Amino acid sequence: MKSQIHRFLTDFNRAKWRIAAKGVIGGFAVGLLVVLYRLGIEYGTRFAQVMYGTFREHPIYILPWAAAAVITGLFVAWLVRWEPMASGSGIPQTEGVVTCGMRMRSWSVLVVRFAGGLLCGLFGLSMGREGPSVQIGAATSQMTAGRLGRSNVERNVLTTAGAAAGLSAAFCAPLSGVMFALEEIHRSFSPTILLTAMSASLTADFVAKQCFGMTPVLDFTRVEQLPIEEYWWLIPLGLMMGVVGVAMNRLLLGMQTLMNRIPAAVRPIISLALALPCGMFLPLTLGGGSNLIAFVEQGGAALSLLLVLLAVKMTFTATSFGSGCPGGIFMPILAVGALAGGIVATIGGYFGGFAHLDARYISVFAVMGMAGTLSAAVKSPVTSVLLIVEMSGNITHMLPVATCAFLALLVSDLCGTKPIYEALLDRYQRSHGIGGDIGDGVAANAANAGAGNAATNDSDDIDDVDFEDGDFNPANARPSAIRSGVIEHPVEIGSPIAGTLVRNVPLPDGMMIITIRRGSRDFVPGPDTPLHAGDYVVVLFNGHDEPKARITLNRLCRGTG
């Protein structure tokens, strides 16, 4: 029996290269769509800046603008009601699809993302394109995988790869796209997922660079290097960025709670109305925030102006996001971090003696502030560090950036802050009746998340696998059947099953651990084999219960920290 299982797993291991090749195809399609989305959002932000500048000289044009804002707000509210999976950032919904078995209607998500997102961009709402790009990538890859994928597991891997490709094309930062998909979306670092995500991410980055050139969205190649004698500034900076990240996290969630008390049709109109004074008097706060980041990096801004921009950007972002309009918070959080870092550096310039900070270091403080704030709000520190280092094009910034990111993460943990995307996913599931205990209709609830979807498991049943009271007979299974029902998941430090014997792992009927990957060694466990933190468990499951299997493993294998 052990030899047959190993034969099947070896076949599964060879299949990762086939899946990676499909990731290239999906990455190309994702790159094209994200490039179109980026171009549309960039045009919309420029149009909004010109439009609000015109209003300052000709206030009479505000009247037709108000009428257009009401019509647009009502239309966006209708779009979001028609396809709720496309509301807000899109990253929490993508997490739900990958890890919780939620269903996503790819074509309708793409329609709402483009129509709603581009319309909101024309009015300059403070929302980023990176989160939507992640969901555009996942939806596009899911459509591609629907034709190329041989199983639900394979399609799930390709969806994760599409999410990586989406962020890669949005930032022209392929490694950051891969890391974000693994650290935040899939929460697994298996070789198959890593290889497929990398192939899709590099392909999407190639497509984006053909359009936008070799320069990333945020070009930090000329950032001044912080001298070693100024490294003591990293402590107050990291702690302050932690406070700002926590504040941003809670402001976003709190504003969403407040806006949910308002009729859904009115929420987008409120956010569009707030865009008018912001655009007329503080145009730098419009859009995702790339212009604002560039402004901070140039230095020379008065402390009072930076403080006003910080307060307005945070409030404008929270209102725009809380309204449910299609748009992300990734770039606005980075912009808030750049402002906060610039404020700390500007204050440092007021000191004398050894504490004095030269004005030329404002740009590097802004860069470190971005990493720290993102790490504290999203709680994906590795992605935060890698993104900034990749965009800076200089690995010498890694030590100060990483120090700031992890100090900010420490503050966030001490404050008991929940990762923003995880909190948003929980809220989405509760509001749509998704979730509950394992075995209490989770699979059915997850299937209902995308209303109107056709069943996705019919062509991937693994009827050839014989489950009887949890027992598996490999002699009755074809290799393709094994691939149709295998999930690989890491056992994290502090997880409920770390240190538990295999016989005591509370897996439901239809699921069983068939192998453990410990370091470079794979072996079939016995009932008395202990599970260690850092192991990868390979679990065979009934193909009909994929959502249940994924939710079970997430709960059992995820660490408490």
Image (tube, rainbow, N blue to C red):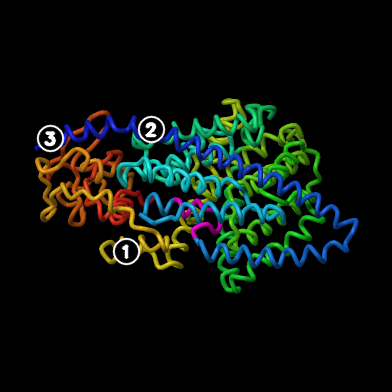
Classified by dominant secondary structure, the portion drawn in magenta counts as helix
User: With 312 as the anchor, is 561 left or right in this view?
Assistant: left
Label 2, on which residue?
20
User: With 207 as the anchor, is 455 left or right in this view?
Assistant: left
**Type of amino acid at the residue the image marks with label 1:** Ala
User: With 316 as the anchor, is 58 left or right in this view?
Assistant: right
* Residue 432: x %, y % from top left: 44, 67
Residue drawn 67% across and 59% down?
Answer: 315
Residue 444 is labelled as 1
How far apart are the alpha carbons under marks 2 and 1? 31 Å
Which numbered disc flags the more N-terminal residue, 2 or 1?
A: 2
**Type of amino acid at the residue the image marks with label 3:** Gln
Q: Residues within 10 Å of mark 3 (few under 14, many from 20)?
A: some
Which numbered disc flags the more N-terminal residue, 1 or 3?
A: 3
What is the magenta range? 85-94
Q: Secondary structure at mark 2?
A: helix
Q: Residues within 10 Å of mark 2 (few under 14, many from 20)?
A: many
Q: How many marks?
A: 3
Whether residues under marks 1 and 3 lie with C-beta atoms below 8 angstroms apart, the answer is no
Residue drawn 46% across and 58% down?
Answer: 425
The answer to whether 16 is drawn above or below residue 270 in the figure is: above
Which numbered disc flags the more N-terminal residue, 3 or 2?
A: 3
State whether residue 399 appears in this view. Answer: no
**Type of amino acid at the residue the image marks with label 2:** Ala
Q: Residues within 10 Å of mark 1 (few under 14, many from 20)?
A: some
* Viewer-nearest residue: 169 or 421: 169
* Residue 67: x %, y % from top left: 76, 67
Label 3, on which residue?
4
